[in-house]
Amino acid sequence: MADDALFEFLHMEIVAHVYKEQATREDIDKERVTCVSTLELMGFRVGQGLIERRFTKDCPTFKEDLDIMKFLCKDLWSTIFRKQIDNLRTNHQGTYVLQDNKFALLTQFSTGKQYLEEAPKYLAFSCGLIRGALSNLGLESVVTAEVSLMPSCKFQVVIQKL
């Protein structure tokens, strides 16, 4: 449990640091995009590294995109957040929705709608993490996150067909 608290605290400090570094800029909209991109790229590299070091040795080869997504929702998510994704949905055309009803990186905020504006900056790293893991498993994707009620979160993953 101490590991979870340390990871959550480190994540909060990384987000604060990235936004603090950009605070000297004049254009607030550009600052927000830059910060979200920076956090997403950090997450991307961490996701790649987790797959490289931790899972590729023991991981079976996957036949379909859905098998990769199931692996991500069960094994990878459990390793990082100590629980599986609560719900995985797909349209069987390359779009997947992963729902976590108690997302660990949002649980420190009050439930309700008062912090919804702040949520995207705390989800950028996780979007990158998913995208990086999928990239190393052979899927290029676009990952977005949506929060309508804290601490529940939906990640939409759109697989890019090459």
Image (cartoon, grey):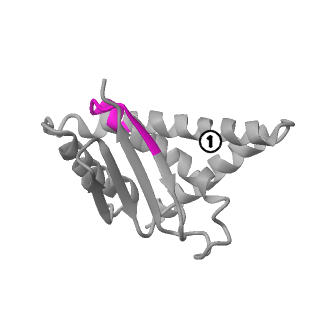
List the residue tagged with mark 1: 36
Magenta stretch containing residue 140, yes or no?
yes
The picture places residue 14, in percent across and down from the top left corner, at 63, 47
Q: How many numbered circles does the render carry? A: 1
The image quarter in which residue 60 lies: top left
Residue 135 versus residue 143: which sits nearer the camera? 143
Q: Amino acid at mark 1?
A: Val
Residue 140 versus residue 3: which sits nearer the camera? 140
- Is 50 above or below relative to 112? above
- Is 8 above or below relative to 150? above
Give the residue drawn at x 29%, y 41%.
94
The picture places residue 30, in percent across and down from the top left corner, at 74, 36
Quadrant of the image for the N terminus? Answer: bottom left
Quadrant of the image for the C terminus? Answer: top left
The picture places residue 114, in percent across and down from the top left corner, at 68, 72
Q: Is residue 84 visible?
A: no
Give the residue drawn at x 48%, y 47%.
144
Element on which disc 1 rests: helix
Give the residue drawn at x 31%, y 57%.
78
In the shown orientation, is residue 106 left or right of residue 159? right
Write the start and end of the magenta stretch as one range: 133-143
Magenta stretch containing residue 8, yes or no?
no
In the shown orientation, is residue 76 left or right of residue 63? right
Give the residue drawn at x 45%, y 38%.
46
The image quarter in which residue 109 lies: bottom right
The picture places residue 35, in percent across and down from the top left corner, at 67, 40
Q: Is residue 154 visible?
A: yes
Q: Which residue, as the protein is rendered here, is positioned at the far top?
A: 162
Residue 75 versus residue 4: which sits nearer the camera? 75
Q: Residues within 10 Å of mark 1 (few under 14, many from 20)?
A: many
